[in-house]
Amino acid sequence: MSGTGNGKMKDCGETPLTRPAARRGSYVADGWSGREEFRARVVEWAGKLGVDAKSIFIRPMSRKWASCSTAGTLSFNDELLDLPQELGDYVIVHELLHVAVPNHGKLWKSLMRAHLGEYDKMEDRLKLHYFQSSRVRHT
Ligand SMILES: [Zn+2]
């Protein structure tokens, strides 16, 4: 199933899964030790994928998990630091591939599958985090 194939692209692409309000400090056992570990993983994946990641930013983003430009600038939502590493891996690879492949077409999908296996499951889990953390209201 195609999942998140809708929406318009900006620059070379973005990860269009959004979470408006942050709830920080939630502990996950398989989470990141901090932004340095996350950044190191981006560099590692960039090397593996042969992508030239010139600048890497980890910063608050209100509308998406990550974005990139064809110039090789990548930005990641710092809320990813509160999520399990494999979801971070998903967003990292998703975004790095967009530097070369600016859409979610066949090539992008086959590269995602080659590097992450059943990536659609991670996509679903990421959505779940989105709904759990920002959409749940106490009524
Ligand atoms: Zn994308």
Image: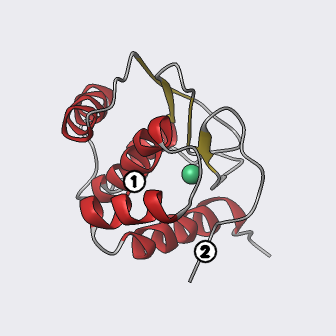
Residue indicated by mark 2: 3
Q: Residue furthest front?
A: 107
Count of numbered tags: 2
What's the residue at 38%, 44% (across, down)? 92
x and y percentages locating residue 59 in the rendered image:
53, 26
Q: Secondary structure at mark 1?
A: loop
Q: Quadrant of residue 34?
A: top left
Horizontal and vertical percent position of residue 55: 42, 16
Q: Residue at x 64, y 67 (%)?
A: 4
| 7 is higher (above) or lower (below) than 63 | below
Is label 1 or label 2 in front?
Answer: 2
Nearer the N terminus, badge 1 or badge 2?
Answer: 2
Residue under the point 37% across and 65% down = 110
Q: Point out the image quarter for the C terminus.
A: bottom right
- The quarter of the displayed image where residue 63 is located: top right
| Residue drawn where x is 67% and y is 59% of the image | 134
Q: What label does residue 83 carry, if any?
A: 1
Location of the N terminus (image quadrant): bottom right
Q: Position of residue 95 (x, y in %)?
A: 47, 43
In the picture, residue 50 is in which quadrant?
top left
Q: Amino acid at mark 1?
A: Leu
Between residues 3 and 99, which one lies in front from this camera angle? 99
Image spot of residue 133 (x, y percent): 59, 61
Instruction: Give the residue at the far bottom of this rendering.
Output: 1
The foreground one among 56 and 105 is: 105
In this rendering, position of residue 123 left or right of residue 36 = right
Residue 136 lies, with reference to residue 80, above or below; the image says below
